[in-house]
Every structure is written in structure tokens, then in C-alpha cells.
Amino acid sequence: MKLTSHLGRGLAVGGAIAAVGAAGLTMTDRALAAAPDAPANAGATETRTFASEGAQNGLTVGVAPTATDPVESQIVVSGAESVIRDVDVRTFIEHTASGDLDIELESPEGTVVKLVVGNNGAVGSNDSFDGTLWDDSATELATDTTYPAPDGAVPELVPQGALGKFIGEDPNGTWILRVLDANDDADGGTLGSWQLALTTQATAPQLTATEHPSSIGTPLPVPDATDDGGTVTPGGVTHEIVVSGAKDYLWDANVVTDATHSVNVGDLRIRVTNPQGRTVVLSTNNNGGAGFYEDRLFDDSAAALVSTTASDTDPVVPEGALAALVGGNPNGTWTIEVLDSLVGDDQGSLAGWTLQLQSTDAATNGGGTPPPGTPPTTPTPPESTREVCLPQAPQPAPDRSKSGTVTVSTAQLRINQRIYQAAVRRANAVQKWLDAGLVKDDFCGGAIGAKQLGQGLTAGTLPAAQALTPPKPRPVVVEQGQTSSSARFQLTAAQLLINQRVAQAAVRRANGLEKRLDGGLTGGDIRDGQVSQDKLAERLTVTAAAPVAQPAASTTEIAARSGQGGTVRMTAGQLLVNQRIGQAAIRRLNALTARIESGITRSDVRAGSITAADLAPDLRK
């Protein structure tokens, strides 16, 4: 959503929640960025994660000689509240030249957001987007990240197009992720799977639009950068706008700039900071005509990207998403900073800038009036988001040093088989760990919050925060594989097909385990009496615990094998592809093991599933 006016410069202005398919394992980082709290009168709110499934996973991202040949994967969202407040995306894409990739997301309403624009330069590292969280509130910009870079996923990125463009839309329907290899060369990759995290609310906010111009008068000079013995120091200028009279929950922000440069606008860097100290990068060394930043509207909902546009006049999406400011109080001091970052005996100027804001009442200010006859509600106990967990074991980057050197041989076929069998053993170990039942030491300190407490339990608030004890999880024990080579083993396409099915089974098992862990564990998975006070959120306690029936334990849902898979060919290329699938499966199962062994968190436990039987005796009051 955005303001429709573009004033001249200087004026007063959530498918099924599953993930399956070869190479489609979905490992979720636990450090997901939090969505903004709901404003007043939002109605029912929720955050749900949806994941691609079945035929939407394991798609080949092939060589594409034109920009019209992307692969598409869909997630169908249903049952979500009707107004989007925040969208995050996680991608699992393996590719040997990640800089070639062009990735975009389309909503059910047809809105398209570019996550990253392929540079069509046959550059990049391996698997840069294999596990990346795309989040408007991330700390690293996709435009600032260079590919090539070290192998392995960039943990999180602000997309080139703002996901805030989806705010206010209805999330229900079909979402489409498109991945294009924008360079015609010999590399390729796989879209293993992807996830969509939606924070929604039932009611659209009542918005108040305000515009806040600067009062600069004589343009402020932007001094040229200086070079002191090889150390370049940017020259810069700042200016403030004090906002007052706006509603205290920001829903949308646009910025209009009026800046120029005497020689090259590509020297300039521009960023804006809100009253809470959150900074958003508008543009960094983007070039264009002399009027590139004159009367330029920065708007998350714009069609063009500031990093790629050829126009000097169209509204543009900034490099950093202004949606990162949603939820803050817009009243207070805003600051713009314009820097000249290149030495050249020249300078720029800032003639003015304008904030265009849409805001509503915050939930904390009492501004929302409940409908007549609404019964009073009991305040929800405060719930800390802090948890005390162990660090996850670092996962080594894939070793591509010998890629392409496999040979068609019985020995290579047996090596691949052992890789797949190792993946199956790891999946078996994780399932055995879960099926044994969770104990106190498996949980991070503070892992159980008010949302996880179910029927029969009454929550209360402690007068002061309590100490949270770190976990001491049971180890995940992987059985040793048998090394005997006496079994009959022939170099045939039939044997290759058997190996392939073992690999696919390992992938399906791992996907089922991850689905089970991603918010699917229940009180039925916990041995009786294991949730103690130090495993509750910092100020949360239980004041009453009536016995009720426990929910059923979660189960590992394993997708059925799809397709016949009977047309494989005995080639070195097929052996290499299968080997990489197996290696990726092992890496991700190892990451799943590391996740478990760092401690179970509240995001792993289904809301409302903890009952009196799960509580330690001193909490069963």
C-alpha cells in the first residue's frame, strides 16, 4: 500500500505445509527475523510457514539462452487471515554460478517482487541461495553482496525488490517462485524447495496519510570524498525532519529526494533513519542522468528497482526496504544522509526531501475501540522471545574441488550407494531420537511460551525475569554402516535405479522429519513431567493446571514415491548428479541433527499442545 500522490520537489509534501522431492530438503534457521507487532483492531493475527511440496520441489534450473525460460514452483496458501503484514521467503537453490540467477516471487494477486536480479555474467559461487532467508529486515542487502563469494549460502538478504510490496494483500491463493538461469553457459542447478512465512491479520487498518517536507532553503553542499594516503573518507551531509501528529504505528513509508551532483550522481549514497534509529539504504552509487535523484520517489510498491532502472523519473524501489520500518512510531526525528563516496574534485547538493507516511493506531495506545458488547479479555502474560540454546555446529561448505571427475565404474556406483545409505542412517537416527520422547534437557531455556500452553493450564506472570538454563540434549546416535563388499554388485542401469530410489527415500524421510520438527511437535512427544519452570519463558509461570487428555504425539509423514523412475541412463553425468543429491541430503540431515542438539525451541512446538501431564510436579498446582 502507498500514497497515490507524487509531489514535486520542494513542495509541502501462510498449500500444504510440507516439503518433499529429490534435493528438496528444507532446513530452517531458528533465527528468523520477527514480524512487527499487530496494530490496534487488527483482529485475529498469526504467523504461519508454508513450504513447497511434491512436484514443486527438485526442479532443474537449466541453461537458459533467453530471459523467458524460468522454472516455476508453487505454494498454495489457504485458511490464512486476509491481510498481509509481513512476508519472508527462504530458498534452497543449488547452483554452481549463483550470480547467474534471477529469482522473483508472485503473489495470488499478481504482484511480483524481485528477490535478486541475475547479472547474466556467468559469475558466482556455489549454492549462494541454498538456505537463504529473504527478509526486508535483514542486515545485508542483495545489492551489496558479490557473487563470487565464499561457497555456501548467504544466511539472510534484503531482496532487491521489497517484500513490503505485498503488505495489505490477501495471502490466500497460489504463490509462484520463479528461478531463471540468466546466462547461457554450461552450468546449472536445482530448485530444491522453498518456504513462505506469512504474518497476517483479519482486519485491514484504518490509515491516516501525512506528508512531511524538509525546510532546507538554500541547498546543502555534499562535500567530495577525500583520499588520505589511500584511505578514502566519504564527504556527507545530514538533514532532519521532525514528524508530529501522525498515528503511532507506521504502516507504510515513502521518501522523495531532491539531490544532485556536479559531475556524476553515481558518486552518491543516500540513506534514511527513523526515530527508533533504524536505517534504510535508499541508494548506493547507482548511476543515471543528472536528474537521477531529483524529484525521485522511493516506494516499496514501485515497478522499477533503483539498482537497475534506466529512468530518471519513475518511482523506484530502494535498495533497502522501507517496510523494515513498519510498526515503529513515526513521530519524532527522521534523518537523511547523503554521502559522496568517490574522490573526483566535485560535489553534490541536497535541496530537499519529503516523507510520505501512512499510519494507524498502535495496539498499546488504547486507540482502538472494541465493538459494542465485546466481553473484557484477560491480558496475556508477557512472553519473552529470548531463549537460551547451544550454538549449532558449523556445517562445512560443499567440496566441489573434484566435481566432474566421476567415472562410470562399479566402484563409483558403490560409493554413491554408500552415500545414500549414510543419509538413510542419519534420518533413522533423528527419527529414533524424536520417537524416544523429549526430556527436560532437550529444551532450550525459555522454550515454552504462553502460546504453547494448552487446555487446563492458566498462565501467570512472575514479578521478575528468571534465569533460563541452557539445554543438555541427548545426542543423536547414527549407527555405523557395514563395510562388507562381498554382496553382489553389478554396473547396470538397474543397479543405478536402485541407488537412485534409495537416495529419493532418504530425501523423503528427511523432509518428513523436518516437517515434523517445524512447529509440529506436541505435548504428546514429551515424556511426562519434563517441562520445568526454567524451561518456561522468562516471566511466564503456571498458576493452575487441570488434567486434560494429552494430544497425540507427532508422526513422521513420508511422502509416497512419485513417478516410475525407470528410464535412467548409465552415464558419468547421471552418477555425478545423483552423488550431489546424496551429499546435499547428508549435509542437510547433519544440519537437522545440529539443530536438535542445540536444543528444542518454542518454534518447534505446536501452539496449545502442552498439558498438565507435561509439567514438572511443582508446576501442577
Image (cartoon, rainbow, N blue to C red):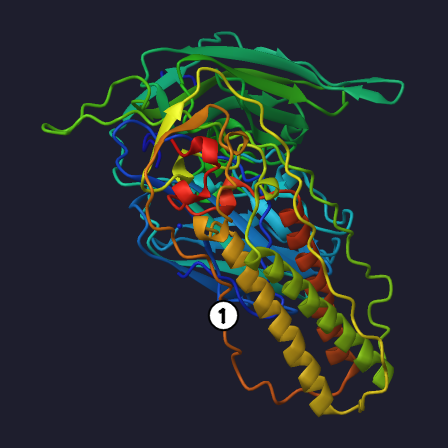
When the figure is inspected, residue 394 is found, relative to residue 537, above or below; the finding is below
Residue 86: % across, % down: 42, 39
Give the residue displayed 71% in from the left and 69% down from the top: 582
Camera-nearest residue between 163 and 362: 362
Numbered-mark total: 1
When the figure is inspected, residue 112 is found, relative to residue 558, above or below; the finding is above
When the figure is inspected, residue 318 is found, relative to residue 463, above or below; the finding is below
Residue 267: % across, % down: 68, 27
Residue 234: % across, % down: 72, 19
Kind of residue at badge 1: Gly
Q: In the image, is 203 to the left or to the right of 226?
A: left
Camera-nearest residue between 296 and 179: 179
Camera-nearest residue between 619 and 35: 619
Give the residue displayed 51% in from the left and 64% down from the top: 556
Give the residue displayed 77% in from the left and 51% down from the top: 151
Give the residue displayed 57% in from the left and 41% down from the top: 440
Which image quarter is the C terminus in?
A: top left
Residue 248: % across, % down: 35, 18
Q: In the image, is 100 to the left or to the right of 374?
A: right
Among the 4 quarters of the image, the one containing residue 583: bottom right
Among the 4 quarters of the image, the one containing residue 164: top left
> Looking at the image, which residue sits at the far right?
229
Q: Is residue 364 visible?
A: yes
Residue placed under numbered mark 1 in the picture: 54
